[in-house]
Each structure stands twice: as structure tokens, then as C-alpha cells.
Image: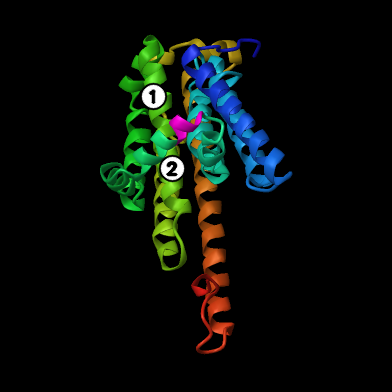
Amino acid sequence: MSAWTFAPTVVLPVALAALLYGRGLHLVWSRAGFGRGASVWRAVLFALGLIALAAALVWPLDAMGESLFSAHMAQHIVLMGIAAPLLVLALPLPTMIRALPRPWQRGLALFVSWRPWRRAWATLTRVGLATLLQLLVFTFWHVPAAIALSLEDDVVHALMHSSLLASGLLFWTAILRMRGDEAGAAILALFVNFKVSLVLGALLAFSSRAFYDSYSDRGLSWGLSLLQDQQLAGLLMMIVQAMMYLVAALVFIAAWFRAMDASKSRPVGMPRPEQVR
């Protein structure tokens, strides 16, 4: 619990993101006033997202993940199910870009408006493809051979975490951009992830066989056998990860019903709020 992981590939990007966002926030609020131009609640979400990244990659889960598969599983849950949605909801990029020199801002604006990039981004953030990518990445990195390799090679270890976070960011971007009639696709994607997490978690939690021999007796210092450690990881996947997707789906369902009720209560011929300019 006293072991901190100060890998430059983790600490430097997180510190740079915090620095750019903090400077951008200062510039916006000093000109427009506190809470204007960048909302306080989004700033809080961004801070919480960075804290989640630090908990997963700096302290304490990364060090614990070297000896406990369940801690390794907790890392993945935090990256994909907590840090990723918080960072997507925070919408930090416009604020961070304000901290850059003007020539860099213009260059980024040109790149973002570049048609090939816009097409690629639109494709990657389609809810079907983003869901498939996340499931493939998550499943691959829980194959016993992949876990064993990540414990032996720091480059593979970093690739695992970066790909899990990237797939989580794409998935939640696709989910949170769904509006109106598209909410059904978001709900379906969330239920698919809920089901997969539940099934894979049950496989680990209720199996009488230990699949992750690469952890051997590492968990004994924590009072857990190899099988008990795997079962705990399965329970985390079943209870924590699966429930996060279920709660998100229920939130979307509630919002969908509210939108339907509002549409029914509106007089015939009255335009929707989004149609008023």
C-alpha cells in the first residue's frame, strides 16, 4: 500500500493534462467570470477523472496489481468505467486548447476540421463499433496469456492500460452523444456490456479452477490463494463493473421516458425546444 508507481508514461501525460486544463480554466474565468465559459461541475468531473486515473495507475492499484489479480481487475474497472466516463462528461479539450499558443490552436482547428479526420472520428465513435472495440479490448486483456505477458513486460503493461482507457473513452463518447431516438442504441450497448461483464465475472467467480497461473502464490501475502483471488476478481466484475453499466442504462431509460412525456404534453404544432433558434 506504500508503493507508488511513478512511470513517466503515466505521470507526465496526467500532469500535462492537469496543467493545461488549469491554465485554460484560469484564462476563461479571468475573462468571463467564475463559472462562465467552463462550468464548475465539468471542472469537478475533470478533477475526479484525473484522481481516478491516479488511483488506477499511480497509487494504490497498480502496485497491488502486481501481486493480486483482483487488484488488476479493479484497475481495469476504474479505467474503463469511472475515469473514462468522467473525462468524457467533463469535455476538457476546449478548455485545454485555450491554454495553447495561438498558432497551435489554429493548427488544431484545421486538423479537427480536416475531412478524413472527421470521417475517422465519426466512424470510431459509432456506438456499435465503439462497443465492439471495447468488448474486444477488455476480453483480450483478460486472456491468461495476455495477463502473464503484461506482468513480465512493462511495455505490454503500458499498452494494456492505454488501450483499455482509449477504448473506454471511445465507448463513453459514443454513448453520451446519443440523443432523442438514438437513446435506444445507447441503452442496448450498455445492456450488452452489462451482460458480458456479468457472464465473464460469473465464469471467474464460480469456477473451481484457477486460470491465471502467472500470479502463482503472489496473493498469499494478502491471505488469498490463487483461486480466491480469481473469485474476488470475478465478483468485482459481476457486482461493480456490471452494475455500473446497468445504472447507466437505467439513467438513459429514465431520460428517454421523460423526453417522451414532455413530447406528449406539448400542444400540437408547438416546436420542440431544440427547434427554436
Asked whether, in this view, residue 185 is left or right of residue 269, the answer is left
> Quick check: can you spot residue 210?
no
Q: Quadrant of the N terminus?
A: top right
Residue at coordinates 32% horizontally, 51% vertically from top-left?
128
> Mostly what secondary structure, the magenta segment?
helix
Magenta part of the protein: which range? 101-105
- Indicate whether 221 appears above or below 277: above
- Indicate whether 243 appears above or below 268: above
Disc 2 residue type (three-letter): Ser
Q: Which residue is mark 1?
A: 160
Q: Residue 78 — which label? A: none
- SS category of the residue bearing label 2: helix
Please report whichever mark, 1 or 2, sits nearer to the chain's N-terminal start: 1
Badge 1 crowding class, 10 Å Cα cut-off, few under 14, some 14 to 19, many 20 or more, is many
Residue at coordinates 58% horizontally, 10% vertically from top-left?
221
Q: How is the image coloured?
A: rainbow
Q: Position of residue 224 (x, y in %)?
A: 55, 18
Asked whether, in this view, residue 95 is left or right of residue 122, the answer is right
Which-is-in-front pick, marks 1 and 2? 1
Badge 2 crowding class, 10 Å Cα cut-off, few under 14, some 14 to 19, many 20 or more, is many
- SS category of the residue bearing label 1: helix
Farthest residue to the bottom: give it.
Answer: 268
Q: Position of residue 92 (x, y in %)?
A: 55, 39
The residues bearing labels 1 and 2 have C-alpha atoms spaced at a distance of: 18 Å
The front one of 254 and 271 is 271
Disc 1 residue type (three-letter): Met
Q: Which residue is mark 2?
A: 197
Residue at coordinates 55% horizontally, 46% vertically from top-left?
89
